[in-house]
């Protein structure tokens, strides 16, 4: 199981007004994201040096950087209309929030070599993230905005598309932040096929009465 996972509760009838003004309403989150991003630029560098020297992720750094990843993904999912609920400004996990980014505890040891060459290793998925999934996310967000504002509902297919993209973004950001040494896969968030109900046990016919 990959150490970074994404979950999103589906709301088929979001609020039209908060959807219409989403980018304006998101201004405070843009400001907070800038603040967290500046701090993350420093802590990310410190984490890189620490892993190369010590071979492990200092706990306080891991908690802060994983929190920034969590905040970024939750806020992005809200901006692109996968949820109506205002995202928290904090970095901590919140199981009651409709968007959940689950991050496993820090590993006891991490590869110094993989950390040293992380920017080279992450380049292929960053290319996909920048020129592939980001455009899918923008298209899905636009379709969601038009459908919610004019029709009053979120299409299930668009929600699934956003889940696919946001899941991949969460894994790439986590990998970039050294939260795991495992390369981020694509497609873990695909819906599982519904399990067919188990057939009831066969019952034996009643015994014939004795003559």
Image (cartoon, helix red, strand yellow):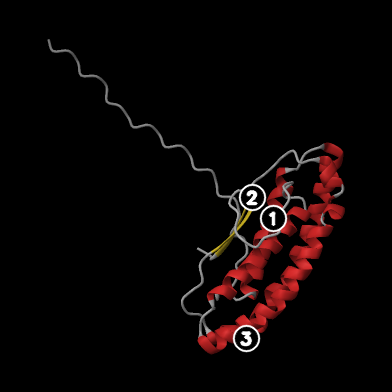
Mark count: 3
Instruction: Name which of mark 1 and mark 3 comes first in the sequence.
Output: 1
Q: Position of residue 11 (x, y in %)?
A: 69, 42
Instruction: Name the side, left or right, on which 109 lies relative to 10.
Output: left
Label 2 residue SS: loop
* CA gap, disc 1 and disc 2: 8 Å
Q: Which quarter of the rendered picture does the C terminus lie within?
A: top left
Q: Quadrant of residue 15?
A: top right
Determine whether 51 is above or below 165 in the image: below
Circle 3 Cα neighbour tier, 10 Å, few/some/many (<14 / 14–19 / ≥20): few
Is residue 75 visible in the rendered image? The answer is: yes
Instruction: Name the side, left or right, on which 150 lies relative to 101.
Output: right
**Of discs 1 and 3, which sits in the foreground?**
1
Instruction: Name which of mark 3 and mark 2 comes first in the sequence.
Output: 2
Q: Position of residue 81 (x, y in %)?
A: 77, 50
Instruction: Name which of mark 1 and mark 2 comes first in the sequence.
Output: 1
Q: Mark 3 sits on what residue? A: 117
Determine whether 7 is above or below 114 in the image: above
Q: Mark 2 sits on what residue? A: 97
Determine whether 204 is above or below 45 in the image: above
Label 1 residue SS: loop
Residue drawn where x is 69% and y is 78% of the image: 123
The reply to whether discs 1 and 2 touch (Cβ–Cβ < 8 Å) is yes
* CA gap, disc 1 and disc 3: 33 Å
Label 3 residue SS: loop
Circle 1 Cα neighbour tier, 10 Å, few/some/many (<14 / 14–19 / ≥20): some
Residue drawn where x is 66% and y is 78% of the image: 43
Q: Mark 1 sits on what residue? A: 88
């Amino acid at each position: 199981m990959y150490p970074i996972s994404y979950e999103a509760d589906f709301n088929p009838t979001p609020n039209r007004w908060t959807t219409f003004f989403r980018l304006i309403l998101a201004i405070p989150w843009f400001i907070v994201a800038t603040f967290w991003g500046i701090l993350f630029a420093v802590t990310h560098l410190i984490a890189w040096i620490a892993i190369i020297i010590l071979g492990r992720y200092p706990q306080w750094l891991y908690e802060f950087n994983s929190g920034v990843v969590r905040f970024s993904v939750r806020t992005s999912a809200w901006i692109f209309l996968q949820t109506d609920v205002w995202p928290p400004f904090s970095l901590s996990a919140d199981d009651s929030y409709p968007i959940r980014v689950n991050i496993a505890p820090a590993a006891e040891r991490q590869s110094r070599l993989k950390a040293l060459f992380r920017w080279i290793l992450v380049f292929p998925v960053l290319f996909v993230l920048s020129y592939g999934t980001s455009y899918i996310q923008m298209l899905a967000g636009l379709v969601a905005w038009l459908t919610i504002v004019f029709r009053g509902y979120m299409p299930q297919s668009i929600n699934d598309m956003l889940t696919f993209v946001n899941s991949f973004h969460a894994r790439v950001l986590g990998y970039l932040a050294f939260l795991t040494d495992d390369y981020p896969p694509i497609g873990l968030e695909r819906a599982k096929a519904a399990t067919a109900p188990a057939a009831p046990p066969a019952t034996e016919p009643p015994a014939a009465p004795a003559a």
